Image (cartoon, helix red, strand yellow):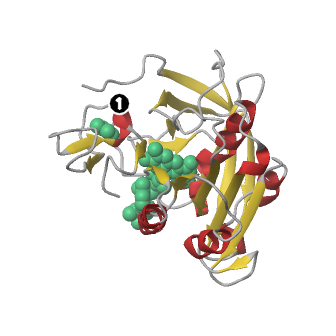
């Protein structure tokens, strides 16, 4: 049975920076009394303020970036009470941080296959370090494409930072205000003609988008992985608040549900239903 990762800690971190991005998000930088060693991309942390402004239950966020001193950044879209409270933190204030949690993306294979990272809106968060780590692990930058979609330009957060990573970046907006005029699946379809050889697809974003990306991958015979952003309670496998249905012939066998927090949040698309 899956258990919380052995490196999970509960720490009071200190806010180091708070940088607005796009129309409705911010990047929260935090430092730790005991910095973490290099973290695998795709893992996540539960965060809350240490006062009553935050709900009692911390909220999950992917690790966005990590610097050489172990300081972490989280890319946060402001939605409800939990994220609004985090948006009100100021430099020097404490935040409660539980993690690292979850499994992260699978090991990057420099096997000649193209890697298409397909993110929607805030679903870009687990991809910045994924791209850095894939390149560091030998995947040629020209084989990596980050397809980043949003309703409009203001929901493509830190696009310029992604462009600085030196891989192919294809922006796509529903209203045509940035890059390809259309959604990420249409952008992927437009890339097919120039593609020779195998492709692996990794996606994170709203569920309908991921479903469409997986259908696109299946149709073209590409392997795919998804990073789910289900609602979470405890984040450590106790509350069953993050159950996701498993596929009949998948790796979970007869077990009908997986726990996103400890079995995921990254799954092979053949393992669970989006
Ligand atoms: C593993 C994981 C990683 C995540 N990484 C990030 C990240 O890097 N950056 C980021 O901004 N968010 C991320 N999320 C989503 C984030 O946790 C939620 O947006 C957050 O919990 C909302 O809290 P809130 O109190 O502000 O909103 P709430 O008051 O809880 O909800 C506000 C509104 O948002 C909707 N909502 C809340 N949570 C979700 C969700 N998970 N999926 C769809 N709709 C939701 C609610 O239905 C409601 O309409 C991640 C989630 C998971 C599980
Ligand atoms: S969030 Fe509690 S079991 Fe996953």
Horizontal and vertical percent for residue 210? 46, 62
Q: In the image, is 8 to the left or to the right of 86?
A: left
Horizontal and vertical percent for residue 14? 66, 29
Displayed quadrant of residue 150: bottom right
Q: Residue furthest left?
A: 254
Label 1 near ligand 2 (CB < 8 Å): yes
Q: Identify the residue at image location x=21%, y=44%.
A: 257
Above or below — where is 183 with respect to 266?
below
Horizontal and vertical percent for residue 244? 28, 49
Whether residue 75 is visible: no
- Choose between 16 and 123: the one closer to the eye: 123
Above or below — where is 50 with respect to 112?
above
Q: For the image shown, how many numbered marks are present on the structure? A: 1
Q: Residues within 10 Å of mark 1 (few under 14, many from 20)?
A: many
Horizontal and vertical percent for residue 118? 59, 58
Q: Identify the residue at image location x=31%, y=50%.
A: 272
Displayed quadrant of residue 174: bottom right
- Choose between 56 and 207: the one closer to the eye: 207
* Image quarter (top left, top right, bottom left or bottom right) of the N terminus: top left
* Image quarter (top left, top right, bottom left or bottom right) of the C terminus: bottom left
The residue pinned by badge 1 equals: 236
Local secondary structure at mark 1: loop
Displayed quadrant of residue 240: top left
- Choose between 198 and 139: the one closer to the eye: 198
Ligand 2, image quadrant it occupies: top left
Q: In the image, is 162 to the left or to the right of 57?
A: right
Q: Identify the residue at image location x=65%, y=50%.
A: 114
Above or below — where is 97 with respect to 270?
above
Whether residue 156 is visible: yes
């Amino acid at each position: 049975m899956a258990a919380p990762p052995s490196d999970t800690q509960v720490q009071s971190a200190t806010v180091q920076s708070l940088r607005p991005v796009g129309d409705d998000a911010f990047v929260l930088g935090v430092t730790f009394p005991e910095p973490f060693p290099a973290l695998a991309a795709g893992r996540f942390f539960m965060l809350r303020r240490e006062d009553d402004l935050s709900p009692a239950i911390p909220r999950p966020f992917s690790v966005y970036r990590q610097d050489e001193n172990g300081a972490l950044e989280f890319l946060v879209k402001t939605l409800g009470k939990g994220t609004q409270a985090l948006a009100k933190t100021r430099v020097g204030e404490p935040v409660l941080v539980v993690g690292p949690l979850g499994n992260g993306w699978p090991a990057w294979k420099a096997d000649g296959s193209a890697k298409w990272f397909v993110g929607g809106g805030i679903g870009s968060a687990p991809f910045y370090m994924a791209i850095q780590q894939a390149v560091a692990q030998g995947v040629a930058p020209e084989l990596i494409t980050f397809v980043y979609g949003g309703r409009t330009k203001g929901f493509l957060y830190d696009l310029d930072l992604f462009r600085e990573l030196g891989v192919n970046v294809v922006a796509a907006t529903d209203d045509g205000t940035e890059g390809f005029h259309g959604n990420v699946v249409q952008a992927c379809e437009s890339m097919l003609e120039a593609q020779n050889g195998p492709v692996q697809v990794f996606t994170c974003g709203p569920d309908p988008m991921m479903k469409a990306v997986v259908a696109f991958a299946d149709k073209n015979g590409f392997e795919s992985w998804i990073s789910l952003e289900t609602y979470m309670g405890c984040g450590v496998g106790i509350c069953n608040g993050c159950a996701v249905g498993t596929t009949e012939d998948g790796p979970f066998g007869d077990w009908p549900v997986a726990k996103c927090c400890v079995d995921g949040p990254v799954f092979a698309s053949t393992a669970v239903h989006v």
